[in-house]
Image: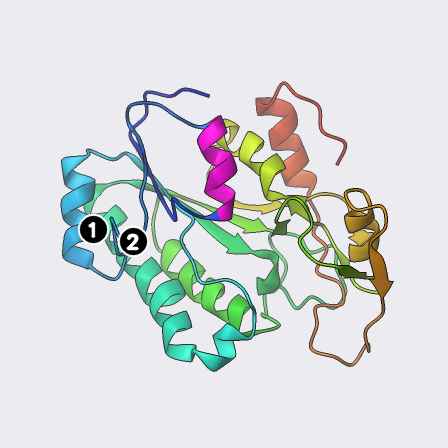
Amino acid sequence: MNTNKSILITGGNSRFCKYLKKQLSGKNVIYSTKKQLDILNYEKLIKVLKQKKIKTLIHVAALSRPMAIHNKKLDLSIDTNIIGTANVVKACNKLKIKLIYFSTNYVYPCKDGNYKETDPIFPINNYGWSKLGGECAVQMLKNFLILRLAMTDFPFSYKAAIKNAYSSFIYNKDFAEILPHILDEKGIINIGTKKRSIFNFAKQNKKNIKGIKINKNSNFPIDSSLNISKFKKIIKKNVKKSYSF
């Protein structure tokens, strides 16, 4: 999709943006990297957004995996995902810019699954807490869209997949096709596909993938599946292509 909207996307060299660049482009669409725009530098952030006359900011930049990094490097997790996001929020508020924030399904307890956008949130790990910290700031804005994503890399990047843990995974490649069509939405939307074991999801892409089981008492999210009724309605309204979610 080629758009005339003035859009800035943080995390421009991320795995997701590799696919988004093929779907969302235009002379006023800017993909910024950390080197070009450090979200911890508030003054520069304001300067760039003013100069480029940005109307929508898609905040993809984040510290994500490996999940253990949020325990080992707590300061980095807080700086990037909470303080950095707070800077983005303050800048968007000051300049009246719409903010689209990439959150995660890990803000939910990840025990019972089928979580709705209105369900209680209680992150399972520090990554979830760091993204929820960002959400708290975003929800103080009047013009925002929070995407609680059950997103993973295409192709499935692991040699084994868990048989007794469930999610609503959607590939980053597939969501990159959809995002340009939902930029005008507001509020909170769960983003994913139907509930499946991680093994069954991965098997679609890797037929010979090894299946493993984990201890149910582990800290791994046993059931992080999402209720995607809202997402499906939005797709039906905005996207011509049919998806089997």
Amino acid at pointer 1: Leu
In this picture, residue 6 sits left or right of residue 67: left
What's the mark number on residue 45?
1
185 relative position to 138: left or right: right
Residues drawn in magenta: 15-23
Q: Nearer the viewer, residue 79 or 206?
A: 206
Q: Quadrant of residue 244?
A: top right
Q: Residue at x 78, y 48 (%)?
A: 201
Q: Is residue 16 magenta?
A: yes
Residue type at mark 2 is Val
Q: Where is residue 9 in the image (x, y as percent from the top left)?
A: 36, 41
SS for tag 2?
Answer: helix
Residue drawn at x 34%, y 69% is: 79
* Residue at image coords 61%, 23%: 237
State whether residue 163 appears in this view. no
| Residue 184 location (% of width, % of height) | 44, 31
Q: Can residue 121 be seen in this view?
A: yes
Q: How crowded is mark 2: few (under 14 residues within 10 Å), some or many (20 or more)?
A: many
> Which residue matches tag 2?
88
Q: Does the magenta stretch include residue 53?
A: no
